[in-house]
Every structure is written in structure tokens, then in C-alpha cells.
Amino acid sequence: MLTNEMFWCAIDNLASAHNISCSRLAQISGLNITSLNKSKRCTVGGKPHWISVGSLVKIMNATNTSWVDFAQYFPRARNYNI
């Protein structure tokens, strides 16, 4: 099962692989510069904020990353219920 945490980790790993910050990744993707900040990954009430498919597509287009390539950035199974 994929989790919210795993998606955000994959985005962090993608940014790192391109030697850029998440803020820069958001900017080159045409997103609000703060949209990928760690503070935006949960609501004020602590509910996980899931990134939209549209935002993922923008990120992947900006980095020339396919869905198959993006899957490589997910964390390896550790303490997940997979």
C-alpha cells in the first residue's frame, strides 16, 4: 500500500536527485513555491495532505521523469504494511 508519507519521500528524493530544493522543484514545475514545503504536508489538524495527480504530473514534466522513473524514488519497504 502506498502512503502519503511515501509520496512525499519520493518527491524529496526526486528533488535531491536533481540537486535542487523542494521549493525550487515547485517553482520550475509551475506550482506555488511553498506547495512542497514540509509544513504543507499535513493540515493544521494533523490530517495528511495528499498531493494531487495534476501536481505530480507537473513535477514529473518539469524534471522529465516518467511514472516508471518516479516509482524508483519511493522509499524501499521498511516498516510499511506492504
Image: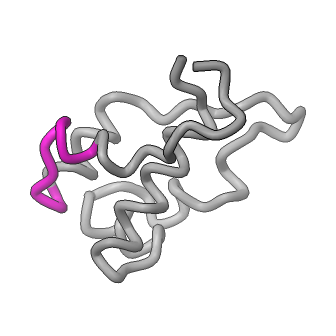
Q: Residue at x 27, y 52 (%)?
A: 59
Is residue 7 within the magenta segment?
Answer: no
- Return the x and y of residue 2 as percentages of the image width and height: 52, 24
Magenta extent: 62-70
Tell whether position 64 is magenta. yes
Residue that extends furthest to the bottom in the rendered view of this protein = 19
- Nearer to us in this view, 26 or 77: 77
The number of discs equals: 0
Q: In the picture, residue 62 is in which quadrant?
A: bottom left
Which colouring convention does the figure follow? Answer: one colour
**Where, quadrant-wise, is the C terminus in this rendering?**
top right
The quadrant the N terminus occupies is: top right
Tell me if 15 is positioned left or right of 12 in this view. left
**Whole-percent x, y for residue 45 in the image:** 89, 33
Q: Position of residue 39 (x, y in %)?
A: 72, 57
Is 2 on the left-hand or right-hand side of 25?
Answer: right
Does residue 79 appear left or right of residue 25 in this picture? right
- Left or right of 40 in this view: 59: left
* Residue pictured at 37% horizontal, 51% vertical: 73
Task: Name the residue rendered at 66%, 45% in the picture.
Answer: 41
In this orientation, which residue lies closer to the viewer: 47 or 31? 47
Residue at image point 10% right, 57% down: 64
Residue 60 point in image, percent of width and height? 21, 49
